[in-house]
Image (tube, rainbow, N blue to C red):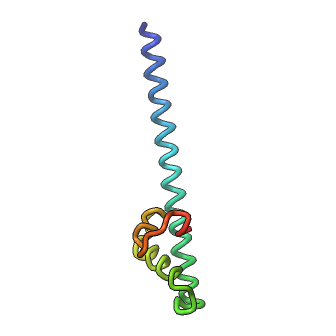
Amino acid sequence: MELENVRILKEMRNSVNRKVNCETANINKTVSAAVKQVEDITYLRDMIGFENMPDNLVEAAYARLDHPDATLKELGESLTPPVGKSGIN
């Protein structure tokens, strides 16, 4: 019985560890993408100017600059009218 308890505990720890690793990787990926988006938006703003871009793209750009840590879903929901994750991407 003791061996079975040890095995179950070990299995639970491994499962939690895998979930934490997955969440950490997803957060790192989200942050990296947001940083790149801010860099790209800044470049476009400085090189061609927002006045030469479509209004919906400028609105999305300002949303990203105002909320650099937001997910794509959160950015889409902050727009007027709200758009989905695929619409903001």
Q: Of 22 and 2, which appears nearest the observer? A: 22
**Count of numbered circles in the view:** 0
- In percent of width and height, residue 11 lies at 49, 24
Residue under the image location 49 percent in, 64 percent down: 84
Residue that protrudes farthest toward the front in the picture: 81
Which quadrant holds residue 62?
Answer: bottom left
Residue at image position (59%, 89%) is 47
Q: Position of residue 71 (x, y in %)?
A: 46, 62
79 and 81: which one is in front?
A: 81
Residue 23 position within the rendered picture, expressed as x and y whole percent measured from the top left: 48, 47
Quadrant into which the C terminus falls: bottom right
Residue at coordinates 54% horizontally, 68% vertically from top-left? 87
Relative to 23, residue 68 above or below: below
Q: Is residue 50 above or below residue 62?
A: below
Residue 48 horizontal side relative to residue 79, left or right: right
Q: Quadrant of residue 13?
A: top left
The answer to whether 2 is drawn above or below residue 47 in the figure is: above
At horizontal 46% and vertical 62% (from top left) the residue drawn is 73
Q: Quadrant of the N terminus?
A: top left
